[in-house]
Image (cartoon, rainbow, N blue to C red):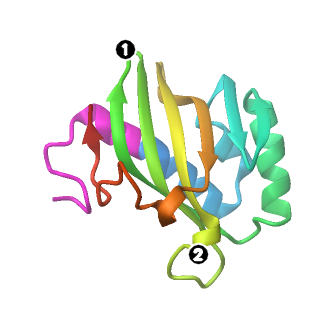
Amino acid sequence: MIGSYPMTMSAGELDLRKSILHTSAAWAAGDAETFSLAFAEDAVVVIAGVLLQGRCAVRSYIGAAFAGPMRGTCVHSEPVYLRQLTTELVLVITQGGVYLPGEAQVAPDRSLRASWVFSRSEPGWLISAYHSSRPACGGQGPGYRGGRIGHH
């Protein structure tokens, strides 16, 4: 096992995981430009109930968040489900949340479950669509697989 991942993870799954980690690292650095580069130019994002259309909108929104209420926070997104939709599109469901400075775990009111649709592109996988919401049952309701990726 590598963390909570089976060692049988494919190269494609590792690339997707790297894309998710890229967003977490950019978030931790408060770097809206680098964060937004993980998204396709025409990405559609719903975050905190706000609909964003396009990479520029993502950069603007997250830049304002990093300058304000999300300053100094970190985000963690653990894949719990992966489904290849086509050779060019993959759906990933993650569980995690936002950590405030000094916190060791995500508080229930900041836990997130998210849907990511990745599209294959020349530089690698880009996020074409993203939606996050608070999970029911503290994130451990039906469908939760204890942090392991479920393939379907």
Type of amino acid under label 2: Ala
Q: Residue at x 30, y 32 (%)?
A: 12
Q: Position of residue 87 (x, y in %)?
A: 34, 14
| Label number found at residue 107 | 2
Magenta highlight on residue 37:
no
Q: Quadrant of residue 129?
A: top right
Task: Determine the residue located farthest toward the bottom in the rendered image.
Answer: 102
Other-residue count near label 2 (Cα within 10 Å), few / some / many at <14 / 14–19 / ≥20: few
Q: Residue at x 45, y 49 (%)?
A: 94
Please tell me which residue lies in front, 77 or 48: 48
Q: Is residue 53 placed above or below 64 in the rendered structure?
A: above
Please tell me which residue lies in front, 40 or 111: 111
Which stretch did the figure color magenta?
1-17
Q: Secondary structure at mark 1?
A: loop
Q: Residue at x 39, y 49 (%)?
A: 79
Q: Position of residue 16 (x, y in %)?
A: 39, 38
Q: Quadrant of residue 58?
A: top right
Q: Position of residue 117 (x, y in %)?
A: 51, 29
Q: Is residue 97 left or right of residue 56?
A: left
Q: Is residue 6 placed above or below 90 in the rendered structure?
A: below
Q: Nearer the viewer, mark 1 or mark 2?
A: 2
Give the Cα distance between marks 1 and 2: 36 Å
Q: Is residue 108 placed above or below 12 in the rendered structure?
A: below
Q: Secondary structure at mark 2?
A: loop
| Label number found at residue 86 | 1
**Count of marks overlaid on the render:** 2
Q: Is residue 7 left or right of residue 100?
A: left
